[in-house]
Amino acid sequence: MPYSKIIGSGGFLPPRVVTNNDLAAELATRNIETSDDWIIERTGIRQRHLADPGVTTSQLATEAARRALLDAGIQAADLDLIIVATSTPDHIFPSTACLVQAALGARGGAAFDVQAVCSGFVYALTTADAFIQAGRARTALVIGAEVFSSILDWNDRGTCVLFGDGAGAVVLRADDQPGILAAKLGADGSQMNILCAAGNVSHGAVVGDPFLRMDGQAVFKLAVTSLTRSANDVCSMAGVRLDDIDWLVPHQANIRIINFLGRRLGVPDERVVVTVDQHANTSAASVPLALDAARHDGRIKAGDLVMMQGVGGGFTWGSVLVRM
Ligand code: ACO
């Protein structure tokens, strides 16, 4: 049975950088009070990249994909599977993955979206890995991409300061050497209300609330417990110890969740990849953007053991352990 090997990665952030001070000044024009100090202290976020009006998730995804293909040294025509993880698709249908396929000039392979909010990338990566292990694909493009700013209530200071836009991508190829060693996904749909955007479009009208709503403290607790359990499970499955992990690449929601998790798992800060300060929470894009940043600045090297972890709405979570 073949392994899936990550042979390339790429990331793309929209060029418009909005600092906490920029955001505080903008919110102040609507009498909504926030500050750089509050945001940094509670979240670790210093800035986020926001897409300009009209920029779509598939456009960000395609840019990240082009960079990942270049990094992997392969052509779009070589892809036989494209999976996009997103909660902010361009359309109801077709899937964002089909739009990316067309934009890249790839043809004929399978293309579909995965919806698991901030866990989306680890869900998509695990799905692509299963395709490759089963012999149903040999070369897969896995993307996490979001224009999350489009589902934020910019009058709700409790949520709008937390998120950003972006896309990250990896190319996987079948290989007889590992590769992805183990993966485990989980969900608890009974917790749907603590983090949701519960609206829809029906009969030509928006039905329900189209904006993201969150019970931050409930999310914090569930994120830490589910990710701790998930990390232990995936290490047991692979027969490795938490100590063996070279790099933890967790979902970038909040520095306090990341620090808490690192302490619980016994992974020292210098082996935890952090981008939340620069990118804020880019939902499904956060893990591949962080992975790509650490690969390209030389921290994550071939042969390193890397644990990627996602957690988010649903409630969903998951971990993927990979030998780079
Ligand atoms: N600026 C200033 N004050 C604010 C802001 C803001 N942006 N947002 C909320 N406040 C105020 C609240 O109104 C409240 O004021 P009050 O005491 O007068 O009522 C006070 O700050 C405390 O509000 P809480 O919501 O209780 O703040 P908390 O300490 O819980 O921090 C936070 C909020 C950062 C969201 C925290 O709950 C958290 O870290 N949660 C984890 C969830 C998370 O990171 N989610 C990201 C998306 S989910 C995911 O990706 C998995």
Image (spheres, grey):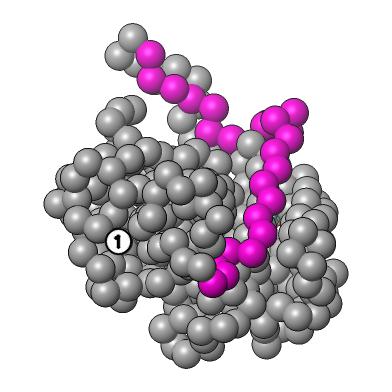
Residue positioned most to the top: 203
x and y, in percent, of residue 245 in the image? 71, 78
Q: Does the residue labelled 1 lie within 8 Å of ligand 1?
A: no
| Residue 227 sits above or below residue 204 on the image | below
Q: Is residue 155 visible?
A: no
* Residue at the image point whose x is 44% and y is 17% from the top: 207
- Crowding near pointer 1: few (<14 within 10 Å), some, many (20+)? many
* Residue in the foreground of this view, choosing between 77 and 312: 77
Q: Can residue 75 be seen in this view?
A: yes
What amino acid is at disc 1?
Ala
In the figure, residue 225 lies in which quadrant? bottom right
Magenta-drawn stretch contains 38: no
Quadrant of the displayed image that contains ligand 1? bottom right
User: Residue 234 at x, y = what percent?
Assistant: 74, 59
Q: Mark 1 points at which residue?
A: 65
Residue 310 percent coordinates (x, y): 62, 55
Query: Which image quadrant is residue 246 in?
Result: bottom right
Residue at x 35% of width, y 48% of height: 81
Q: Residue at (28%, 54%) from the top-left corner?
A: 79
The magenta-colored residue range is: 177-202
91 vs 83, nearest the viewer: 83
Q: Which percent across, then down, holds residue 96?
A: 31, 41
223 shown above or below 169: above
Q: Is mark 1 on a helix, strand or loop?
A: helix
Residue closer to the observer: 194 or 104 = 104
Residue at the spot x=68%, y=87% of the render? 270
Residue 11 shown left or right of residue 85 in the figure: left
Is residue 107 shown left or right of residue 250?
A: left
The answer to whether 282 appears left or right of 229 in the picture is left
For the N terminus, the image quarter is bottom right
